């Protein structure tokens, strides 16, 4: 009985009085591992000095990054980095690889006298800055000088580190394309919620979006579609089209700019180049590497298409290797996503070259031919110091050893992969598909289908109970996927992404025992002011 009363009081303190107090003062998302609330404020003024114990390199960049966040509101940049000591200045960043705070972890200590950030790596200090950013008034996001140039930061002590080392969001830029400026802004917001991976879906049936210098027809043909279906592709039969040519691609210069921008925000950009399916656009440009002698076209509606690269033709692999060479030059990410989903194998059945390959390689059929294809690409990437990541179908028919599996058709693919010793990213449709409806209101904009409300995302537990404890470490983390068949504008992208991405951020970062949906929603209401100030559209709950 006593225990019960104590627990009730504790839970009241946790979700009641204390939570109310902390929602206003600490509207943090994701919820940190440890937070000790304290009264009082540290006041930042134009005279506040930022310092770090290291004068150059990444740490120095962080000093200037923090200065840039603050100086927009304060009116002038007056921050110094004198280095050397950990106790000079009013805001101190201390990086010390001997302290044991966890990769990407940090301690943020705020007293009326000083703010101290302590981390074992610069990523940790970067996340401390993101926490600090959320503790500041949302107006800082506008970068507009305040009438009275002071910023109040509530005192407290936060010790924090992530639950998962992979925290991702995928954006499909093949079905619809978004500006470089927008992608940068999107990445910046992801970083604010402590995501560290941006999975960039660059090729699909409906468009090829990455400039490959060796293959100019990808730019002139594959990057464009004749027109686009209007309305929902599943229910509006006969199909209607808008009769507007649509397309474009990201130049290599633009890609470099985005990758560099993301790096400054501790975000790895993983490119996805789809093999061996989802390639109608590529085959429209280079039909000789398809199985059938036909006039392929960049798809003008959504769905799954029969176009598949010919697995019997050596030219296909030359094409793949040549273009991946350019991809590797643009993307330093160790992981390269090679797709592998929804491969239609009919054309392989009727293709003499593919059948010859099956015979020569002693394969049992088309399923194994797909494995052959994936393994060949994998071997090439491995030889160049990269590893592959692919959708869970890459498991079918056998998979090479060090591939990472992205489990999208539920969690089963991920469980199977982990039990086979593959690293896994959990991205199951029922929790992590941000192209699905988020509300049952009839006013919702047209979406592909499904139903993934905010609460569902929040509820997501990436470690399945049926996974044996010795294989849990194979689950590297989580990701949400934002497919854009029905999402033509950046405002709409944000509407679908937020605040669901905030919920996923907490799934990815915070330990389950630190989670509470009610508490999350209250923090969210305050936290959303930052998105508003950034002019990021979001759905209301
Ligand atoms: C399945 S998820 C796909 C995509 C679609 C998406 C729509 C996956 C690996 N493939 O091509 O855009 O469904 O929700």
Image: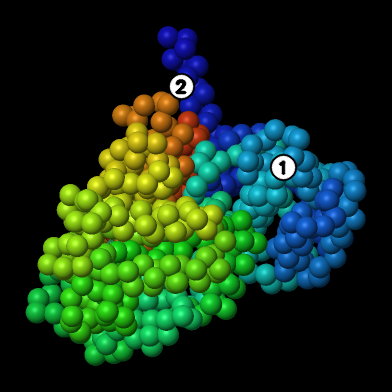
At numbered mark 1, what does the secondary structure look like: helix, strand or loop?
strand
Depth-wise, is mark 2 or mark 1 nearer the camera? Answer: 1
Q: Is residue 204 visible?
A: no
> Could you classify mark 2 by the number of other residues whose Cα lies within 10 Å: few (under 14), some (14-19), or many (20 or more)?
few
Q: Nearer the viewer, residue 13 or 494?
A: 494
Which residue is tagged 1? 119
At horizontal 36% and vertical 53% (from top left) the residue drawn is: 375
Residue 451: give x, y in percent of width and height: 26, 54
Label 1: few (<14), some or many (≥20) within 10 Å? many
In the image, farthest residue toward the top? 1
Quarter where residue 219 is shown: bottom left
- Position of the N terminus by quadrant: top left
Q: Does any atom of ligand 1 lie closer than 8 Å to the CB of label 1?
A: no
Q: Quadrant of ligand 1?
A: bottom left
Residue at figure coordinates x 37%, y 42% from the top left: 460
Give above or below for 101 relative to 197.
Answer: above
Q: Is there a contact, CB below 8 Å, between mark 2 and mark 1?
A: no
x and y percentages locating residue 132 in the rendered image? 67, 51
Residue placed under numbered mark 2 in the picture: 8
């Amino acid at each position: 009985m006593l225990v019960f009363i104590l627990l009730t009081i504790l839970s009241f303190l946790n979700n009641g009085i204390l939570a109310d107090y902390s929602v206003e003062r600490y509207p943090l998302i994701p919820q940190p591992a440890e937070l000790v609330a304290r009264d009082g404020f540290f006041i930042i003024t134009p005279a506040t000095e930022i310092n770090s114990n290291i004068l150059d390199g990444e740490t120095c960049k962080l000093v200037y990054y923090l200065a840039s966040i603050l100086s927009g509101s304060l009116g002038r940049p007056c921050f110094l980095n004198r280095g050397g000591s950990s106790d000079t200045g009013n805001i101190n960043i201390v990086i010390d690889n001997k302290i044991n705070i966890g990769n990407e972890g940090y301690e943020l200590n705020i007293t009326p006298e000083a703010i101290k950030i302590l981390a074992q790596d610069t990523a940790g200090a970067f996340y401390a800055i993101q926490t600090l950013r959320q503790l500041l008034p949302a107006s800082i996001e506008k970068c507009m000088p305040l009438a009275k140039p002071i910023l109040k930061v509530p005192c407290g002590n936060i010790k924090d580190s992530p639950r998962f080392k992979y925290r991702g969001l995928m954006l499909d830029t093949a079905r619809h394309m978004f500006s470089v400026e927008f992608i940068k802004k999107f990445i910046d917001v992801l970083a604010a919620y402590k995501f560290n991976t941006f999975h960039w879906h660059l090729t699909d049936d409906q468009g090829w979006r990455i400039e490959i210098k060796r293959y100019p027809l990808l730019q002139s043909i594959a990057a464009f579609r004749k027109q686009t279906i209007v309305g929902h592709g599943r229910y509006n039969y006969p199909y209607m089209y808008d009769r507007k040519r649509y397309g474009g691609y990201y130049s290599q210069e633009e890609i470099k700019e985005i990758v560099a921008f993301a790096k400054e925000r501790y975000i790895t950009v993983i490119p996805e180049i789809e093999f061996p399916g989802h390639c109608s656009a590529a085959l429209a440009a280079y039909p000789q590497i398809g199985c059938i002698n036909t006039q392929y076209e960049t798809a003008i509606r959504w769905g799954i298409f029969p176009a598949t690269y010919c697995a019997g033709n050596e030219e296909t692999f030359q094409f793949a290797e040549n273009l991946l060479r350019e991809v590797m030059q643009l993307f330093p990410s160790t992981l390269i996503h090679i797709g592998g989903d929804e491969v239609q194998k009919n054309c392989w059945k009727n293709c003499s070259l593919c059948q010859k390959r099956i015979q020569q390689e002693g394969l049992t059929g088309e399923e194994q031919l797909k494995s052959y294809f994936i393994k060949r690409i994998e071997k090439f990437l491995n030889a160049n110091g990269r590893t592959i990541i692919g959708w869970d179908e890459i498991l079918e028919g056998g998979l090479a050893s060090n591939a990472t599996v992205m489990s999208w058709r539920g969690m089963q693919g991920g469980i199977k992969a982990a039990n086979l010793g593959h690293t896994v990213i959990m991205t199951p449709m029922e929790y992590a598909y941000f192209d699905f409806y988020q509300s049952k209101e009839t006013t919702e904009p047209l979406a592909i289908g499904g139903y993934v409300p905010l609460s569902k995302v929040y509820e997501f537990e990436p470690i399945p109970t049926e996974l044996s404890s010795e294989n849990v470490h194979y689950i590297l983390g989580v990701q949400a996927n934002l497919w854009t068949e029905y999402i033509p504008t950046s405002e709409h992208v944000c509407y679908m992404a937020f605040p669901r991405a905030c919920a996923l951020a907490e799934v990815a970062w915070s330990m389950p025992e630190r989670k509470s949906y009610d508490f999350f929603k209250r923090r969210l209401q305050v936290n959303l002011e930052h998105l508003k100030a950034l002019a990021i559209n979001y759905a209301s709950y």
